[in-house]
Image (tube, rainbow, N blue to C red):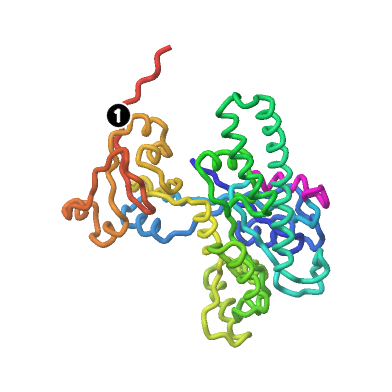
Amino acid sequence: MLLEKQGIVGLPNVGKSSFFNALTNSSAPSENFPFCTIDPEEARVEVPDPRIDVLYKLYNSSKKVPAYLTCIDIAGLVKGAHEGQGLGNAFLSHIRAVDGIFHLCRAFDDADVIHVEGAVDPVRDLEIIHTELRLKDCELITKHYESKGRDVARLGVNGDKSKKEEFAAVKKIYEWVVEKKKDARTGDWTGKEIDIINEFQLITAKPVVYLCNLSEKDYARKKNKWLPKIKAWIDENYPGDVLIPYSGTFENALSQLETEAERTDYCAQLAAKHEITVPIISVLPKIITTGYSALRLFYFFTCGPMEVRCWTIRQGTKAPQAAGVIHTDFEKGFIMAEIMKYTDLIELGSEAAVKAAGKYMMKGRETVITDGDIIHFKAGQVNASKK
């Protein structure tokens, strides 16, 4: 089972722990002073998807098991963190251990909430965090570059070819990240170079989703003076990355309400207060699904009267490996995958109708699984290895 983790990263007092609390409905401390969070808080959040509820009813199942995303609240970084400022070394090691990043910045003024840099400027804050992460990568890459360079020099012209190729790959990464001051995720890499980047666990190789914490009023009005500047910065430096505005104040207020009726009433009152005619809704489901997708994850379904379950796999996974997520013996003894599309099942109404329409497919080892496939695997008996 894949247990990929999204780390919540940003300066102190930008709303990371409050966001984590609302996201996970937990109770991580969120006091108004830097380094309130020292040890990272971790929680699994359900990936929202109405399809599992539809399938649950269609199959009259006893249980449903959604997909999950693990989120980690990492303490705030400050300028100089790569050199150990604040509690930088510990925090950066926590970031190295996650698979993707929610990069959270603050775009609201509040005299009661201290800003570690003295004033609100989310573009400056984004630059600070990116610089600290890249400089920490530079430190690691430089050590490997110098060490492997010395090894190759000792070997001479007739030395081990594989070591020379490895050094050439490290040199290319060094030139991109250290000399050109670029994030690893923006480079053009070969398979071998990607393996090295993964081995180094480079922080700047991790996918990033940007979150902008607004005041409740700005979120309701969908207006904030910083949003266009943040979007322009992202488009210039990391084109294609997603920016999601949200309001920690709004989301935490919603999370404290127990019923859907109470939440609906609160949103209606907020809209009336700010003279908003469009519905005000939580953006947390979008944040979760975006973070999940940023890790190149999706899931297929297994369905029956006992349960409907989501099984998380990575994009490009073939049928035997998908079967192995359920049980390793299913991959070893893989025979075929019986697959139907969710859209076909919903359109036609039953498995029998899908089969009658010729849309129930028998697929082999080279089949690449796609999002939302409903699969029944067939596998042979796997004999225990003889000693």
Q: Quadrant of residue 337?
A: top left
Specify whether 102 is left or right of 125.
Answer: left
Where residue 136 appears, as percent x and y from the top left, is: 73, 47
Where residue 355 appears, as percent x and y from the top left, is: 19, 51
Query: Which residue is farthest top?
Result: 387
Where residue 75 appears, as percent x and y from the top left, is: 74, 53
Q: Which residue does the image show at 58% across and 52% down from the upper left? A: 185
Question: Does any portion of residue 253 appear in the rendered image?
Answer: no
- The boundaries of the magenta stretch are 82-97
Q: Name the kind of residue labelled 1 in the image.
A: Gly
- Which of these two is toward me, 308 or 328? 328
Q: Which residue does the image show at 65% across and 24% down from the upper left? A: 155
Q: Secondary structure at mark 1?
A: loop
Circle 1 residue:
380
Q: Which residue does the image show at 83% across and 51% down from the upper left? A: 85
Look at the picture and state if 13 lies above or below 266.
above
User: Can residue 80 be found in the magenta stretch?
Assistant: no
User: Can residue 91 be found in the magenta stretch?
Assistant: yes
